[in-house]
Amino acid sequence: MKSSKYYLSPFSQTLSSLKKGDIVVLMKGITKRFPGVIANYKIDFDLRYGEIHALLGENGAGKTTLVSILYGIHQPDEGEIYVYGKRVHFRSPRDAIRMGIGMVHQHPRLIDTLTVAENIALSLKDAPFINPVPNVEELIKEYSEKYGLKVDPKAKVWQLSAGEKQRVAILRTLISGAKILILDEPTTSLSPPERNDLFEAMKALVEEGASIIFISHKLKEVLGISDRITVLRKGRKVGTVSAEESSPELLIKMMLGESKPMSIGLGLGKAKDQLHKVGHKVGKKILEVHNLYVLGDRGEVAVKGVSFEVREGEIFGIVGVPGNGQRELVEAIVGLRKALKGVIRISGVDITNKGPLAVINMGVAYIPEDRIKYGLVLDLTIAENLILKDYRRPPFSGRIMLNTSYISKWCLDLMRRYDIKTPDINTPVKYLSGGNLQRVILAREFSHNPKLIIAFRPTYGLDVAATEYVQKLLLQEKQRGAAILLISEDLDEIIELSDRIAVMFEGKFMDIVPAGRADAERLGLMMMGVRFHEEDKDTCGKSL
Amino acid sequence: MTNVIAKQIALFINISIKAGTPLLLASLGEIYAERSGILNLGLEGIMLVGAVTGFILAHSTGNPLIGIIVSLLAGALMGLMHAFVCVTLRANQVVAGLALVMIGTGLSSLLGRSYVGVALEKPLRPLKIPVLSEIPILGEGFFYHDILIYTSYVLVPLLWFILYKTKVGIQIRAVGENPAAADSMGVNVYLIRYACTIFGGSLAGLAGAYISLAYTPMWMEGITVGKGWIALALVIFAMWDPLRAVLGAYLFGTTDVLQYWLQMPLQRRGIDPSILGTLPYIATIIALLIGSFERIRKRIGAPASLGKPYVRGE
Amino acid sequence: MKKIRIRVERVYEVPLWLRIVIPIIAILVALSIVAIIFLIQGINPIIAYAEIFHDAFLTTYGIKFNVVKLIPLLLCSLGLSVAFKANVWNIGAEGQLLMGAIAATWIALFKLKGYPSYIVIPAMYVLGFIFGALWALIPALLKAKFEVNEIITTLMMNYIAMKLVLFLIYGPWRGTTTWKYPITDEFPAEAQLPLIPGTLIHWPSLLIALILVPVIYLFLKKTKIGYEISVFGLNPNAARYAGINKTKVLVIVMLISGGLAGIAGVGEVAGIHHRLRYPSSISSGYGYTAIITTWLAKLNPLLLLPTTFFFGGLLVGGDVIKIDLRLPSSVVYLFNGLILTSLVSSDILLRYRIRLLVVGEEDDKCHS
């Protein structure tokens, strides 16, 4: 049974002589351009032995591009890379892996239909050619215990939770002998307790001689775990500071530049206070879900008896780690998935299993989680995307033909109202930026003053400005009297925006609490399945 | 009496296997190609080229084995071309495959035009396997065939084993399901796709050679009569599993036998038996239907990346 | 010392001239490969091409034949452009065409034998459309309800249609006046389509085809259903979300596609052969060639006119090859296949471009 110490034999001498503070990775003057955007511009970055070095910046700052270059996925236009003092040119991840660099992507890139052991056997040089699985299972057990990363080697990856998949990805890099680890936004799909487990594991790894690059856009995490922090903004490096010397304010200033006065999210607090001051009233029930059961893609019961309602003028937030049934719940409500049991009513009308058309006709707006998959047709023009829900009705169309002149006028109007930046309504939507794409969807969905808005991770992947825009829009709609169902994994966002909060875990609501009494820590634990006793709360959350 | 029935059953099995073998060979190869994510609709064309080149070489040299080798090479070459177009040039795999059929059809006609209707003097002869062929009924059914069929017997478990129990097999399946993840783990996606497509092409060429060297030892245009397409349907029916492919291939073989055996009864009833010619094609559609039901039920699908070009970093 | 780097990058906007030039280059590449084949056969390719080009495009004789071949090509291609727009790969135009031919034969020789032209001819077209449409309906329903791959099912229907024709001409419909040859009797005069004098062009079919070009174009671009087809073809998930009915789209698209191929079949038997005969005599691969012309026209019905005219000329050239150069007619398949491969391979040039970067400056030249 070979252990992976064999792997880096050319470097084992180098490795054993490394001490804390030695530079293991040096990237100098890295520049990378993509069509229309400069992703990295003359970035210098170094990683020292035994450190956890965070790469901080908001979405789109260039963090993932930089590490992708290190991992061999992209080639830099300019600049040099040195690993253990040697100049390297990685043409593919294979080259990087050979040098002992391992990467765990934001969404762990594993093969769903294979088992954990098969996934790891894939890339293991030492694994035997014939029947490698039993060997690898042994290795997995060994490393599992050593680092506290528990997984079942025989499980198929699609059965695993996000946290478990994360662990598999990390195990894989370790077993392949990686001593330089790149973790790209590893906590996205983790609940707070899983996050802590991950940080413990990271500390253990560093003790054993690993050096870690940790990418994040979340300040609190970064300050908690890193030794040094490098901040990127719009493709350029702003600076590198040690964690001890920095503070949230300093980091925000570095991330966003001088112009942004408030920290992320605080700006909304004011808007919310305004609403409360106005004496905002909650109206009649718009969405009623009663004892809903929905099947997932693999035949498992993904939603197990969920009941709740949402009223005019309120935001009902559902928070949970992705993969606990939120997607199936939302798809059932919108008519894209069959409900096994239960009733869904909109404005009193039973629309259970009546299909998406019935839901559209009830005046429901849907902001999908996967914008490109469900919300837009990339090759069609902006105009054609904007009419996706309305094209059937006059004046958009007659009995057979579309009314193109009306459509053009209406689209121009929408583009103005929602500030969609593009030269022409006839530009195919695929040329738009992420923020603009979201605006197209918002424009389309909100343009008819919907009664019910279902927003599924509406700010996911957007930068700060776009995120604020969406959140402000949602609050405006709430003021207008819409009923809003907001589903997100971002606990902070949910607490900020919602009036009532439900925690979803394994297809059930753990609890429903009013926002005023929301305790972030407790909610975080509930997201992981921890239950609390009944006497701790009153039934305010569960109205009739 | 029972001796006659026994003979009939043995004959039935024997001919079904013969008829199903080209389908089996072609679909085994295509299973590997599709498992790696490449759709090769050009099987019919490759089979034709394999058939004609195999025939020409066997005819001129008098040795069918040389024909076999040439057909393997010809098929591999066409597979290489398809791989180049689909993997390196990232072309639309459906259209590229259709074009390959056209090329194969035309090329085989061109190459074979002086050999139309010529019979092969020295076709592949069947060999009896000692001991095994003495088994009543089954012996004559399974063990009185030529070496290509015996090769296919060996290929099935071998290919199954490679796909499921070796490291490279895991890599192939990974590339087909999620090439980005496989690439990220250091697997050479392009190499695997090339290898699987070339392999698929060579087996398709071999399948064609089987037809022109053993099954109907002659050359004529379009000698494969749609078997390449049926092989594609077979891959779906087999749910990309080499063992299930055997089941499907031999079942299809039985439709060929039925075509002949039902001729007399139909003629006696005054129905022109050429309508029987539709049997294999109707059977294919039914097989696809069954395959779809099973896939819905078992929630197994095609390799997720089938037909989609892979580009690192996109 | 300046360093020059070569970089391949993805492009999303392609200038118009490039979109025309690159397919042309692709076709020329294919022609060159065929020229090599000519050389191997001992034929001077330049003379051969000149002869083909001249005969097909520059003589009135050739142009007349070109139009004759253009009619079924155009009809099939129009149908295919609708199908492909919905991302439905209808490879069965060949079989749907044959079913249209069967329909026309039935009307002409049996059902409406002896009726006057103004009844028989429209009846043939209508029934031909219906037969072709129904033939395409089966794969459509199988795909809609059971996700069955339509490439294989439509192809299988082709083979079944061919066998059906064979069955009919060898069996119940075998001609009584044809000395045991497997062909039917000749259509009565009323069932024969009128021709443009001095040519073999059966103008009713031509008229239908030409009228349908703008009709299909408007259908796809300006109608509600055309919009649904586009959305469904590009993003079935978004289509589902918008409440677009998948079965409705699939069925309509295949009915149109099959029906138009059926009309093409009517034209061939009622306008040219005046009888039902061997499948390969009725259609020399129109259903398959239509795939190329539609692909070349990028699914735009208006562009089908030039592409089908060009390929009609190629098919005429194919006859030249057959007769003059003594090569089997299926060489046309080889030709078509090479052109299609070339076209589909050249697509990459439209999606990527090569840039030369001089390091240190934003000074780049664009080479495609």
Image (cartoon, rainbow, N blue to C red):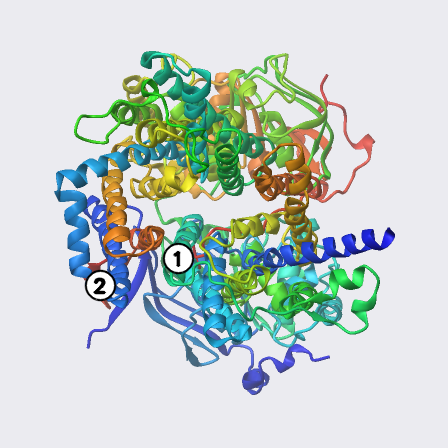
Residue at the right extreme, as displayed: B2
Q: Nearer the viewer, residue A533 or A481?
A: A481
C201 over A36 or under it: above or below: above
Task: Name which residue lies at 55% across and 70% down.
Answer: A51
Badge 1 marks a residue whose secondary structure is: helix
Is A215 located above or below residue C312 in the figure? below
Corner quadrant of residue B271 = top right
**Horizontal side of residue C135 vs A89, given as left or right:** right
Tag shown at residue A505: none
Residue at (34, 24) in percent of width and height:
A417
Q: Which residue is mark 1?
A: B109
Cα separation, mark 2 vs mark 1, equals: 18 Å
**Same chain, labels 2 and 1:** no
Residue C74 at x, y percent in the picture = 30, 33
Label 1 environment density (alpha carbons within 10 Å; few <14, some 14–19, many ≥20) = many
Looking at the rendered structure, the secondary structure element under dot 2 is loop
Q: Chain of mark 1?
A: B
Mark 1 residue type: Ser
Residue tagged by mark 2?
C43
Q: Amino acid at mark 2?
A: Ile
Examine the image and state in which quarter residue C2 appears.
bottom left
